[in-house]
Image: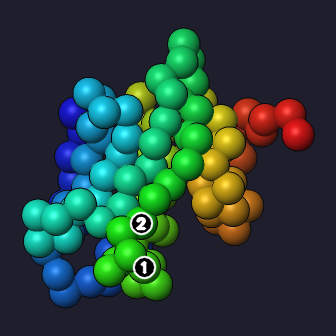
Amino acid sequence: MTENTTSAEDKFTANVSLRRNDAQHWYELLVDGRLAVQAFYHDLPGHIDFTHTETGPEFEGQGLGKVLAHFALDDVVATGKRIIPHCPFISSYLRKHEGYEQFVDWPER
């Protein structure tokens, strides 16, 4: 499991922690120990295929999904795997943020 308590986009005063939960196949962001955002994935040979992202209703609109996306994508790159963005949120994040282009295999539409 990979864990980090800071992010380049972390502008929150709450206690935010991020980690990859390999047992559940998701990246998670916790606020004060409560699960706030999850980015679900399939771990494939050489790839991490992001399928969808969920934000708890009480955490919506706070930018937490962006913080988790940044952490998750950086983690995938650090492991030497490539990104498959089937998740609309992750796909949108990748289109808006530079630096990941060489690590993405865009899915067929």
Quadrant of the image for the N terminus? top left
Residue 35 in view in this figure: yes
- Circle 2 packing at 10 Å, graded few (<14), some (14-19), many (20+), is some
Mark 1, secondary structure of its residue:
loop
Depth check: give the residue in front, 47 or 99: 47
Q: Residue 55 shows which numbered tag? A: 2
In this rendering, would 6 be left or right of 8? left
The answer to whether the residue labelled 1 contacts the one labelled 2, judged by CB atoms less than 8 Å apart, is yes
List x then y, in percent, for residue 95: 73, 61
Kindly report the distance in space between the C-alpha atoms of the residues bearing marks 1 and 2.
6 Å
- Residue at figure coordinates x 71%, y 47% from the top left: 101
**Residue, far top:** 45
- Residue at figure coordinates x 86%, y 34% from the top left: 108
Amino acid under disc 2: Thr
Residue 94 in view in this figure: no
Q: What residue did someone put label 1 on?
A: 60
**Residue, far right:** 109
- Circle 1 packing at 10 Å, graded few (<14), some (14-19), many (20+), is few
Judge whether 31 appears above or below 107 on screen.
below
Give the mark, 1 or 2, whose residue is nearer the N terminus: 2
Mark 2, secondary structure of its residue:
strand
List x then y, in percent, for residue 100: 63, 49
In this rendering, would 106 be left or right of 38? right
Judge whether 98 appears above or below 105 on screen.
below
In this rendering, would 44 be left or right of 25? right
List x then y, in percent, for residue 102: 70, 39
Judge whether 27 appears above or below 93 on screen.
above
**In which quadrant of the rendered view does residue 26 lie?**
top left
Amino acid under disc 1: Glu
